[in-house]
Amino acid sequence: MNGDYLHRIGDLIRNARRHRGYTQAQLADILGTSQSALNRIERGHQNVTLDTLARIGEALDSGIVSLGVPELMHLRVAGGTALSGSIDVKTSKNAGVALLCASLLNKGRTTLRKVARIEEVNRILEVLNSIGVKSTWLDDNDLELIPPDQLDLSSIDETAARRTRSIIMFLGPLLHDREEFELPYAGGCDLGTRTVEPHMTALRPFGLEIRATEGYYHARVDSQVAPSRPIVLTERGDTVTENALLAAARHDGVTVIRNASPNYMVQDLCFFLTKLGVIIEGIGTTTLTVHGVTDISVDVDYAPSEDPIEAMSLLAAAIVTSSSITIRRVPIEFLEIELALLEEMGFDYDRTDEYLAGNGHTRLVDLTTRESTLHAPIDKIHPMPFPGLNIDNLPFFAVIAATAQGQTMIHDWVYENRAIYLTELTKLGASVTLLDPHRVLVEGPTHWSAAELMCPPALRPAVVILLAMLAAKGTSVLRNVYVINRGYEDLAERLNALGARIETFRDI
């Protein structure tokens, strides 16, 4: 390998390691090598074999550094073509994952309609199957779950569990059935960090205490402890709120949760829990009052709503390719701020009257995009908890801003490193300047050019790169798209149905 390529590989490894929350010493220990050797690799000062790259990729749950491994999937994109036609938005990834975890509350049969068949769902299903839950895919992506008489946590699929951070949402459902239990946790989820400690704040009032050692949550539950006053979440996080709801659902009493997230996946979980017999007041607000049910055994049938983040992805695809397409089944109440901002930037579109999603609650519309000339917004673009601009939708505004006239500042204040991945757009011709780990300055319009890139290890920035490739004339290659498959079902094929030219291939 030449020196430049070694430096690129080293940068990718370092970024993926930091994304997983590992120190050099921790990753070196997992790989069975020295920290000094890993330091040389990250600095581009040491040759690495494909076997070493594969082992690093597996340790980091990121094939971003696994060039040449046959099973990895890549995309070849022939860009510069306008899209046309209609496309339906798939059901919510985040709601689907939460509902799979919530099925652990129910001793009866759970049927979920039109579940997105994505890698994140597959990992949760592997975990559920390993502890005794029987899962069956029915027609039209419907999913049936039948629990055993007793869950067998001793047989849990640790590999699958460590590949999804959603495993932490098993804590809420399980704490009512066991005084002690263990769960594997995904790398980077250390107690005391801002991503995990809020969960502990939400669950301690139910008697749960967690000790994290050697890659496991060691849980101990004091059944004599119950919430004596409202639970105030220290972070208005989606999964934190969901964990609190899952614990409260089977608590024999009334639980008040304040500073709760009212986001789309939380609302879907609330609607599902009400079908289990749980009474929840305040759905869609930041204060939830939950009347729990100690024993739940219901044959339940539920249809999660559509995914606003996928809808935003499709909007961005239309904008960056200057296309007119119709996006059907858009959950409008979770995209109103994004659309208002796009209108301010000059985006032109039509929308239908509202109608209800399959869950009977979420408001949907169909959107038809028009070719538009965009200009930069006056103010910076930044996310806020719902009903603000969705945190997961922020990256799409980087590729949109690259098509607009003028300078746009993107402020990703929530995540420590995600903004860095947006600078990969420069390799496709965009002008993206990293101001600090949370802010980038994007200047447009962009004359997109084809390139070959490794997929960033973060889901939304990875899709942003793919969308930019759709606009770039010539043939681009995006390597190892596992991270995209974690959150999107057949995205390349569905874009091809709109006229994109994306080919899936693997190394031989």
Image: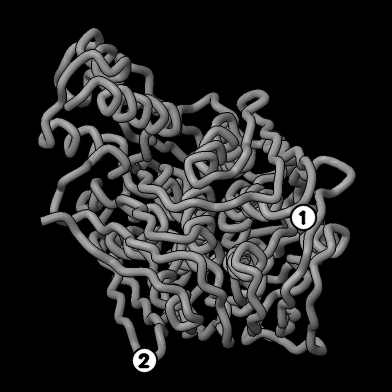
Q: Position of residue 270 (x, y in %)?
A: 66, 68
Q: Quadrant of residue 443?
A: top right
Observer able to see residue 361:
no
Task: Report crowding for label 1: few under 14, some 14 to 19, many 20 or more residues within 10 A (C-alpha).
Answer: many
Marks 1 and 2, the one that precedes in the sequence: 2
User: In front: 312, or 362?
Assistant: 312
Q: Quadrant of the C terminus?
A: bottom left
Q: Position of residue 406 (x, y in %)?
A: 79, 44
User: In front: 47, or 144?
Assistant: 47
Numbered tag placed on residue 386 in the rendering: 1
User: In front: 120, or 497?
Assistant: 497
For the point 47% across and 85% down, the residue is: 299
* Residue bearing mark 2: 139
Q: Position of residue 306 (x, y in %)?
A: 60, 75
Q: Amino acid at mark 2?
A: Asp
Q: Say if 290 sits above or below 360 in the image.
A: above
For the point 53% across and 77% down, the residue is: 90
For the point 70% across and 59% down, the residue is: 263
For the point 28% across and 52% down, the residue is: 160
The reply to whether the C-beta atoms of the residues labelled 1 and 2 are less than 8 Å apart is: no
Q: Secondary structure at mark 2?
A: helix
User: In front: 75, or 80?
Assistant: 80
Q: Amino acid at mark 1?
A: Phe
Q: Position of residue 348 (x, y in %)?
A: 81, 73
